[in-house]
Amino acid sequence: MKNNNDVQRLLAATLAIVLVSGIGIPAFAADYNSSPVDGPSVTRSNLLTPADHDDMIFDGGGPNLVNAYEFTFWAEADDFEFSEDMVLTDVHLWGCDRGTPWDGTIEWWIFEDNAGSPGAIVDQGNGVLVDRTFTGETVPTNCPEFVMDFDLDNEVSLDGNVRYWLGLHMDADFTNINEDYWELTDNIFGANGMLSEGGTFDNWFDGSGSSYAFFLTGHPPGVVGGELLPIDATALLVAGAQANSVWILSALAVIGSVAFGALYLTTKRN
């Protein structure tokens, strides 16, 4: 009987050590961060230089070196559409400048479509990190061509398979004709480009007979810096296990205590 008693005492002691160790050591690393990440807290315009851009998400066509329309006195707009949901981050266009000073402001709008014309404003702002480079070409008559790109000061999330309009205006107000022009393209998408006087956006008309030369860059929702940020299933499992570990260990402690007591009483009887 003595050997049996020794075995039972050994088992009881081992079970107690295991339970105490399990309670004292966390099941997972204590520095795991399960805090959710909200939407973008910064915009690309705060981080990147004009040379850095996302992928092209809409191609409105290149310049035709034939004609352009002034967009300091006028606001001008052209329609576009994505095949899937996208986040618009940058605008790229071709234009020309006859040399009248420009104050450096580029205003942008995204409009809903209203039966083939710009409708309600979806979002608006000013271009930042503006980069304008002259190409060496000339648009008739005597208007040196430039290519311009800029970041939106706030990124815009837009639905796929929905028609929108990009509106642009160079200069801080509509009082001066500074002779900066948005160049036309032979690649006409949807409706022709539209013009509006004075910034009221209630007097759009087709004054170009064509579309404007531009393309857009951006990325799908959930992509930052070109990388998709998926939900980490492993992290979710770890977080759930951590949340449950307290009551699981408590239950094990109770079970272990009962088992220890039972073994102890059995030993005493023997």
Image: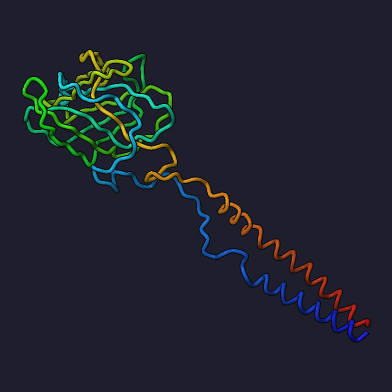
Which colour style is shown? rainbow
Q: How many marks?
A: 0
Q: Position of residue 38 (x, y in %)?
A: 45, 47
Q: Position of residue 49 (x, y in %)?
A: 24, 46
Q: Is residue 65 left or right of residue 258?
A: left
Single out the residue that lies furthest toward the bottom: 2
Residue 146 position, x and y percent, is: 15, 31
Up/down of 126 relative to 33, above or below: above
Q: Nearer the viewer, residue 19 or 171?
A: 19
Drawn side of residue 116 relative to residue 232, left or right: left
Figure quadrant of residue 170: top left
What quarter of the picture does the C terminus occupy? bottom right
Quarter assignment of residue 168: top left
Q: Left or right: 268 with respect to 256?
A: right
Looking at the image, residue 264 lies above or below residue 249: below
Residue 65 location (% of width, % of height): 15, 22
Q: Which residue lies at the image location 38% right of the left edge and 47% below the top edge?
A: 41
Q: Could you tell whether 15 is left or right of 143 in the image?
A: right
**Viewer-closest of 145 and 168:** 145
Quarter placement of the N terminus: bottom right
Quarter occupied by residue 140 = top left
